Amino acid sequence: MNIANKLTLFRVILIPFFLLSLYIIEAPYGNIIGVIIFIIASLTDFLDGHLARSRNLVTDFGKFMDPLADKLLVASALIYLVEAKELAAWIVIIIISREFIISGFRLVAANKGIVIAAGWWGKIKTMTTMIMIIVILFNFDFEGIVVIEQILIYASLLFTVISALDYITKNINIFRE
């Protein structure tokens, strides 16, 4: 269990605390604590990947758990935002559907001994989605925040679709073999 894998597990452990802060602690304090936890968890996503690659700490556990931890964190936040009526369900369905599609591709590829690395569009999608979640959860109170939130929502949606199409077109051959 190396440091990168420990950070991944830490991210998973933070998810219940993130959700509990949103559900149990009254706004705005619950949202602020939730945002802080979400930011810490999001930063571990970038840090564990960097450590794994730069220190040659890539493991099968990390290859499996890191994307799963990301999906659990983001899906938890998105589902909460739907319940809180801060985000339309159809947007969350598209974002989560993309994750299922990509996971399916990776599963088929893994069965054939192929490892499919994350692409840049996926990284941009992840970063945009995480920023969108932070801004919506933080619940800033100033003129124009609704416009900023809408831009982030549709940017996240756009990058979700672009990254899915990019991923599918680059890896469709795994179904031909």
Image (spheres, rainbow, N blue to C red):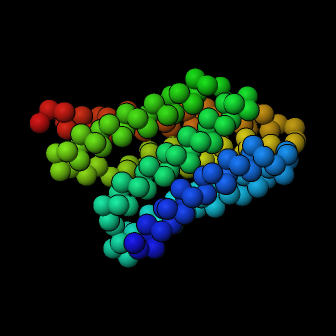
Tell me if 8 is positioned left or right of 118 in this view. right
Residue at 72 percent across and 58 percent down: it is: 36
Q: Quadrant of residue 101?
A: top left
Q: Nearer the viewer, residue 50 or 32?
A: 32
Tell me if 137 is positioned left or right of 125 in this view. right
Q: Is residue 50 visible?
A: no
Q: Nearer the viewer, residue 7 or 166?
A: 7
Which quadrant would the C terminus be assigned to in this image?
Answer: top left
Residue with the most extreme top position: 90
Residue at 41 percent across and 55 percent down: it is: 65
Residue with the most extreme right position: 142
Q: Position of residue 165 (x, y in %)?
A: 37, 33
Q: Nearer the viewer, residue 173 or 36?
A: 36
Residue with the most extreme bottom position: 55
How many marks do you count on the picture?
0
Tell me if 137 is positioned left or right of 62 in this view. right
Q: Quadrant of residue 102?
A: top left
Q: Is residue 21 visible?
A: yes
Residue at 40 percent across and 35 percent down: it is: 100
Q: Position of residue 25 (x, y in %)?
A: 81, 49
Which quadrant would the N terminus be assigned to in this image?
Answer: bottom left
Identify whether 19 is placed above or below 149.
Answer: below
Q: Position of residue 78 (x, y in %)?
A: 61, 37
Identify whether 32 is placed above or below 5.
Answer: above
Residue at 37 percent across and 50 percent down: it is: 118
Identify whether 96 is placed above or below 26.
Answer: above
